[in-house]
Image (cartoon, helix red, strand yellow):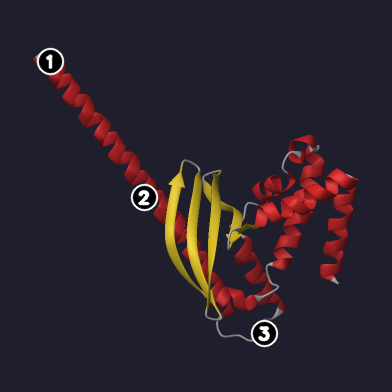
Amino acid sequence: MVNRKLSTLLLVLLLGNASTATLAQAQDEATEVRQLLEQRDGEIKQVLSDKKTLTDAQRDQLKNVINQGIDFEGMAQIALGEFWSKTAAQRRSEFVDVFSEIVRAQSLSNLDVYRSTVKYESVSVDGDSAHVATTTVYRDVPTEVHYILNRKDGEWRVVDIILDDVSTAEGYARSFQTVIRKKGFDALMASLNKKLESMAS
């Protein structure tokens, strides 16, 4: 009886230690995710500084800083939904390339947005997924911005940005999948390439 009680006590202690270790690991990962986004925000503001206009080199630098933490393949997969697995690997790769270039170009459409102050409300980590809730204040207007990140190859990458309950990835999904259902994947690619060309001109 004594041995059984001792075994039970040891099991409880082991489980308690395991639970504490898991909690500590989750907290460390949450800190890592937050620091990643804070560093990105700091680098963006450093490039912008108080400049009214940017040189081409500065715009390229800013574009890289803004987009370096985005998992474009993961976002593209969400955008295509069921059609991702139905599309050949080479065509998927072509889609990711064009899609990422469009997103990168659009990221510089309103530079003042990146001057907003950011308050981190919460950071939660569940395995290889993380959710970060923030509030940004732009022109005295607070906006809820949520980041969804996945850990890929040991690095945290953003796969979706949700502004005031509107998902960026799902917005693309509704548009892209509608085109595919009505006209096919080739029509979507033609439309995206045309859009990319117009943005470059």
Q: Quadrant of residue 50?
A: bottom right
Q: At 36% from the left edge and 50% from the top edge, which residue is drawn?
A: 27
Say whether residue 146 is left or right of residue 111.
left
Quarter of the figure that contains the N terminus:
top left
Q: Sort mark 1 into few (<14), some (14-19) or many (20+) by Cα contacts within 10 Å.
A: few
* Residue 119, percent from left and from top: 45, 68
Circle 2 SS class: helix
Q: Which residue is mark 2?
A: 27
What number is the disc on residue 53?
3
Q: At 67% from the left edge and 85% from the top edge, which residue is drawn?
A: 53
* Residue 123, percent from left and from top: 43, 55
Q: At 47% from the left edge and 65% from the top edge, which residue is drawn?
A: 38
Say whether residue 166 is left or right of residue 45.
right
Q: Amino acid at mark 3?
A: Thr
Camera-nearest residue between 156 and 135: 135
Q: CA distance from mark 3 to mark 2?
A: 40 Å
* Residue 78, percent from left and from top: 68, 46
Circle 3 SS class: loop
Mark closer to the chain start, 2 or 1: 1
* Residue 156, percent from left and from top: 53, 50
